[in-house]
Image: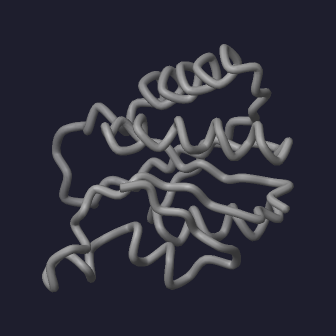
Amino acid sequence: MFKTVLFPIDQSREAREAADVVSNIVQKYGSRLVLLSVVEEPPAEATSADPMVSPEVVAKLLENAQVLFSQEGIQSEVLERQGKPAFTICDVADEIGADLIIMGCRGLGLTEEGATDSVTTRVINLSPCPVLIVP
């Protein structure tokens, strides 16, 4: 049913909590797992480097996630992309032929003001495949 699962990750607690759901689904369906980290392009007026933009930090995040899944007996592929998170997640889902995107939710979309800024809401609206949100 879910041949390819895309799991966009960042350093949030919500992404770590979603990992359990990802593990269960990938094991149940024997899915291919693709881990994605999207680095947002820094604004032109930014004066100091954001630690998340560091290639070393992103590489370590992806490596740690890959180790976590391998301990569960799950092989995973890693992708690192730069761009606007929601658009990049959907582009990658289309590119790899994902059958499902699983994401943690930070809850920003629970208010009217936060709904327009929520990466999760944008992914739900733009995704080429079903999206499972883990609260």
- Split into 4 quadrants, where in the image is the C terminus? bottom left
Q: Quadrant of residue 118?
A: bottom left
x and y percentages locating residue 65 in the rendered image: 56, 26
**Residue 27's quadrant in the figure?**
top right
Question: Which residue appears at 47% of the width and 44% of the height?
Answer: 18
Residue sitting at x 69%, y 46%: 25
- Residue 79 in the image, given as x and y percentages of width and height: 67, 42
| Relative height, residue 19 to residue 125 (above, below) | above
x and y percentages locating residue 78 in the rendered image: 69, 36
Nearest to the observer: residue 48 or residue 93: 93
Q: Is residue 114 left or right of residue 67?
A: left
* Residue 71 horizontal side relative to residue 28, left or right: left
Q: Please name the residue shown 79% across and 27% down the image.
A: 75
| Relative height, residue 116 to residue 8 (above, below) | below
The image quadrant of residue 116 is bottom left
Of 26 and 47, the residue lying toward us: 26
Please give the name of the residue rendered at 75% of the width and 32% of the height, measured from the top-left corner: 76
* Residue 49 point in image, percent of width and height: 25, 37
Is the N terminus in the top left, top right, bottom left or bottom right quadrant?
Answer: bottom right
| Horizontal side, residue 129 vs residue 88: left or right | right
Q: How many discs appear?
A: 0
Left or right of residue 116, residue 93 in this image: right
Q: How is the image coloured?
A: one colour
